[in-house]
Image (cartoon, helix red, strand yellow):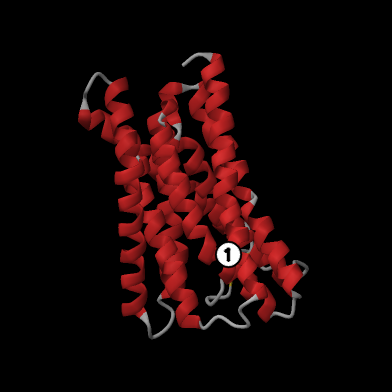
Amino acid sequence: MDHETGMSIVAIGTFASLIAGLGTGVGALGVFLVRQLSPALRDGMLSAAAGVMLAAAFFSLLLPGIEYGEALTGGITWLATLIVITGVVMGAAALYLIHQRLPHEHFGLGREGPEQAQIRRIWLFVIAITLHNFPEGMAVGVGFAGGNVPNGVALATGIGLQNIPEGLAVALSMLAINYSRAQAFGIALLTGLAEPMGGLFGSSLVSFAEPLMPWTLGFSAGAMLFIISDEIIPETHNSNSSDRVTFALIGGFVVMMFLDATLG
């Protein structure tokens, strides 16, 4: 990949992740219309978002990663798969270490990480959502690897759509702890801005070091899989509506599967 092409992929990946991140702000606009979000509806929306992320990890990251790995290894599928698996484990491990060292708070499960009383509760929420959004943005940026614009567009569309209910959930959670509607909207919008930073990071890696593509695609998928399993699924199954949120996850999965098949 030449330098000029690499720069254009970085620009496209960063811009696409910015647009996806703005989905959080679109959802947060609902804070001016909705007075309260029921726990069941919130869990359903977050679970659908997890389904989108799960499908994106498989169809837009892992499968293309194996294809790039095969191209780099001369068609040796088992070696290409092992390279992507290594990236997955590294991505999950990186998110695990971050979660262990950064204090953050969930919507329903409460606080995790080191106890730091001086950190205001609102910033614990902001940290938690940022932990979600950075790897999502990185995944969008990586999705444009090798100039694969259709794959990147499908991934950015799916992530942007799943950010809408997440943005509403964040804003209403802020409203519930006595922040004004304007403040709640601003905070939710701010969390979405982690995505273009992730997009810049991911697209820069693969644009200037093409052999890193299978590793980076696997890394992004691993980070997203960790978030889904460690954060979202336990959070959304913390009530009596586990059947509904399970089907919400499946619904999000098939929507992203359709987007990837038709746009990618």
Q: Is residue 75 left or right of residue 217?
A: left
Q: x, y percentage for residue 48?
A: 40, 65
Instruction: Choose between 101 and 164: the one closer to the eye.
Output: 164
Where residue 172 sits, quadrant-wise, is bottom right
Question: From this viewpoint, which residue is outermost toward the top?
Answer: 2
Q: Is residue 263 left or right of residue 30?
A: left
What residue is pinned by disc 1? 27
Q: How many marks?
A: 1
Instruction: Choose between 37 and 235: the one closer to the eye.
Output: 37
**Position of 95 relative to 172 (above/below):** above
Residue in the image at 43% along x and 45% along y: 155
**Position of 68 relative to 126 (above/below):** above
Residue in the image at 47% along x and 64% along y: 231
Residue in the image at 68% along x and 77% along y: 175
Residue in the image at 65% along x and 50% along y: 193
Q: x, y percentage for residue 120?
A: 75, 69
**Position of 240 relative to 46 (above/below):** below
Residue 97 visible = yes
Instruction: Choose between 211 and 167: the one closer to the eye.
Output: 167
Q: Quadrant of the C terminus?
A: top left
Q: x, y percentage for residue 77?
A: 21, 30
Q: x, y percentage for residue 67?
A: 29, 30
Residue 120 visible = no
Q: Is residue 87 left or right of residue 39?
A: left
Instruction: Choose between 188 and 73: the one closer to the eye.
Output: 188
Mark 1 residue element: helix
Three-letter code, disc 1: Gly
